[in-house]
Every structure is written in structure tokens, then in C-alpha cells.
């Protein structure tokens, strides 16, 4: 028989389960509130006109966005300079509200073998979508140079057969890895690395919007580490701000973990002043910090390129650095190679003095 005590116990259990449920729901909603969108995505331009740098390429895309009738495109250039952003912005401007059903995007993380080209891409090209006059469905193939040769061969005929309803946009780092038949069917748009000024202008927009405390030397360090790559610059800025809440030179190099340019500059200065032992000691310090020979020699090249020295000496230094980099890329990445490079640089300096 049901008693009063049983009723109280039931109410107690009900209240306990309700409080647990409330705690669980509040804990599940807490991460959603504090979730921070990567600044690369947050500040990705949505219009072709907003894209930073590469004015000539962007102006060509603006004409396509205005007039419609987009040709097959190949966008080629180094990473992080706006190729994918340009294609996505162009597709948004051309298709507007029809973007979702009229765009198929495949990148290197998707399976893009022969079967995908024959089935998924072909089925999308055959699909009927109602679009305004002069507009076409768009297939975006990001990092197309990583597609196998067989998949590219299968793609060439699909591009021709369905060209009246579907257009292809391929983004790649090196256009030479796209087979000739596809290159001949596409208009090639080349992108180059962004200048320091272009990256700085975008960084200032993000810094002001996010209220990031900084010193000019900090932004200079971010631009140096990015080397013309906007994605790298924004990621480095966000990582430095998240880790230290202040963007200065020291914090940036702690986050990016590249050889400090001032340290490398001292090595070059010691070579030019004839202090070979000091330059070797500085190089040993960098090597012992755990930096790879590739990192050291890449930073060394960039320092030499901008160092104020006689032109003949600079040319010799760059030539020797190039040969050493080639040997390191071949797999001979030892400390001995780097010391040998410093010896060659010292000899080049002595030869220049004799001349």
C-alpha cells in the first residue's frame, strides 16, 4: 500500500533528477557560449571586392561577378593568399540564395578518386537546378594539384559535356601539376604572396575589432613570421593574443617558435666582421635550442636578402645559402652543413675584400 513516506521519497528523487538535469544542461550550454571562432573564418571576406592584395586577379574576378557567365577557372599561387576565399566569394555573388544547392565543394580532405569524379561530380552536373539567366552551377575543387592523374583524366570529359550547365573552379599551389588538357580548358588566374603593407592593413582591422593590446614591433614580428601568408598572420595573431593577452616581439616568437631574426642577424654581422668563431657559436646556440636546419637556413636567407651590405657580397651570400638549402632538402641536414655554409660566407667576404 502507498504511504506518505513513499510519496515524499518519490518527490525527493524527482527533485534530485531535475536538479541533475538542470546542471547537465547548463554545463552543455557553457562551452557553446565561450566558443571562440578562429579569426581566419570570422574575418574571411564574403565579397570579391573585400579581398586583400592581388588587385589584378581580384579585378578579373569582379568583372565575372558583375557580368556572370563564369568560365572554367584555375586559381594558382602559394597557400594563405586568398584563392579559396576568392572562389567562395565569387560563388556567393553569382548565385546568391541558390548557393547551397548550386555549389559542390571538394577539397583534399574529401575522397576525390576516379569514382568520385565519375559518380558524385557527374551526378551533381546532371542535377537540375533553377538559376537566373547567365548563371551556372559551380564545382569547386580545392587543392586540385593533389588529385591523382587518373581522376584528372576522368574530369576532362565531364568538364566538356556539362559545360552548358556547370562550371569548374580549381584552386592549386602549382598549376603545372594540373594536366595539360584541363589547363587548356580553363582561364588561369595567378595569385602572388601578399606584401607586408597589405597584411598589416588587414591585421590593423582585426586588432581594432578584437581590441588586442599590441606594440608595433609585435605586428612587425607577425608579418615577418607570416612571410606573405595572410592565414598564417591571423593565426599567429590569435595564438599570441590567446596565450599572452599582449602582442609584442618576444611573445610572437615564443608562439611561432621560429629562430629569432635578431639572433640570426648577429650571426650574419659576425661573418661580415670576420668573427667566424662568434658566428659559429651563435649558430650552435640556435641548433641546440632544437630548431631544424631548414628553419634556420630559411630565416638566414630572409635576413641576408634584407641586410644592408655590398651588392656583390649579398649575391654571393644568397648563392651559397641556396646551395646549402638544396643539400639540406636532399636530406643532409646536419650541423656540419650549416657550419660549412658559414665558412663559405666568410670566404665570399674575403674574396670581396680582395676585389
Image (tube, rainbow, N blue to C red):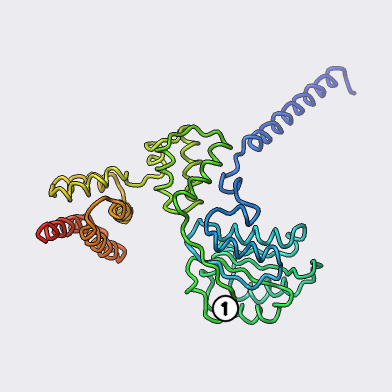
Percent coordinates x, y for residue 69 in the rendering: 70, 71
Residue, x 30% and y 66% (percent of image)? 330
Q: Quadrant of residue 143?
A: bottom right
Q: Choose between 13 and 252: the one closer to the eye.
A: 252
Q: Secondary structure at mark 1?
A: helix
Q: Choose between 5 and 139: the one closer to the eye.
A: 139
- Where, quadrant-wise, is the N terminus in this rendering? top right
Q: Quadrant of residue 91?
A: bottom right
Q: Is residue 240 above or below residue 308?
A: above
Residue named by callout 1:
182
Percent coordinates x, y for residue 283 in the rendering: 22, 48
Q: Is residue 138 above or below residue 219?
A: below
Percent coordinates x, y for residue 229 in the rendering: 47, 53
- Where, quadrant-wise, is the C terminus in this rendering? bottom left
Q: Which residue sits furthest top?
A: 4
Residue, x 28% and y 50% (percent of image)? 307
Left-right relation of 297 to 343: right
Q: Quadrant of residue 315?
A: bottom left
Percent coordinates x, y for residue 123 in the rendering: 72, 73
Left-right relation of 123 to 218: right
Q: How many marks?
A: 1
Left-right relation of 192 to 33: left
Q: Is residue 263 above or below residue 103?
A: above
Amino acid at each position: 500500500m502507498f504511504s506518505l513516506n513513499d510519496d515524499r521519497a518519490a518527490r525527493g528523487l524527482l527533485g534530485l533528477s531535475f536538479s541533475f538535469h538542470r546542471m547537465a544542461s547548463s554545463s552543455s550550454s557553457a562551452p557553446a557560449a565561450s566558443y571562440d571562432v578562429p579569426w581566419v573564418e570570422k574575418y574571411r571576406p564574403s565579397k570579391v571586392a573585400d579581398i586583400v592584395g592581388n588587385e589584378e586577379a581580384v579585378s578579373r574576378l569582379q568583372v565575372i561577378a558583375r557580368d556572370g557567365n563564369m568560365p572554367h577557372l584555375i586559381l594558382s599561387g602559394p597557400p594563405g593568399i586568398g584563392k579559396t576565399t576568392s572562389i567562395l566569394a565569387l560563388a556567393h555573388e553569382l548565385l546568391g540564395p541558390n548557393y547551397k544547392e548550386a555549389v559542390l565543394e571538394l577539397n583534399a580532405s574529401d575522397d576525390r578518386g576516379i569514382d568520385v569524379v565519375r559518380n558524385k561530380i557527374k551526378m551533381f552536373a546532371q542535377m537540375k537546378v533553377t538559376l537566373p539567366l547567365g548563371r551556372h552551377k559551380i564545382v569547386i575543387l580545392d587543392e586540385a594539384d593533389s588529385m591523382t592523374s587518373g581522376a584528372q583524366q576522368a574530369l576532362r570529359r565531364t568538364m566538356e559535356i556539362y559545360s552548358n550547365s556547370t562550371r569548374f573552379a580549381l584552386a592549386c599551389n602549382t598549376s603545372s601539376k594540373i594536366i595539360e588538357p584541363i589547363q587548356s580548358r580553363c582561364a588561369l588566374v595567378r595569385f602572388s604572396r601578399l606584401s607586408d603593407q597589405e597584411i598589416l592593413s588587414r591585421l590593423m582591422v582585426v586588432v581594432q575589432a578584437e581590441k588586442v593590446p599590441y606594440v608595433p614591433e609585435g605586428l612587425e614580428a607577425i608579418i615577418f613570421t607570416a612571410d606573405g601568408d595572410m592565414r598564417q598572420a591571423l593565426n599567429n595573431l590569435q595564438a599570441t593574443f590567446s596565450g599572452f593577452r599582449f602582442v609584442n616581439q618576444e611573445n610572437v616568437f615564443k608562439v611561432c617558435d621560429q629562430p629569432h631574426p635578431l639572433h640570426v642577424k648577429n650571426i650574419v654581422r659576425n661573418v661580415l666582421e670576420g668573427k667566424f668563431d662568434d658566428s659559429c657559436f651563435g649558430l650552435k646556440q640556435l641548433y641546440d635550442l632544437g630548431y631544424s636546419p631548414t628553419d634556420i637556413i630559411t630565416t638566414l636567407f630572409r635576413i641576408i636578402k634584407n641586410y644592408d651590405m655590398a651588392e656583390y657580397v649579398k649575391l654571393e651570400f644568397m648563392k651559397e645559402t641556396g646551395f646549402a638549402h638544396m643539400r639540406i632538402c636532399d636530406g643532409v641536414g646536419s650541423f656540419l652543413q650549416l657550419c660549412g655554409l658559414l665558412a663559405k660566407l666568410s670566404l665570399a667576404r674575403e674574396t670581396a675584400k680582395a676585389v
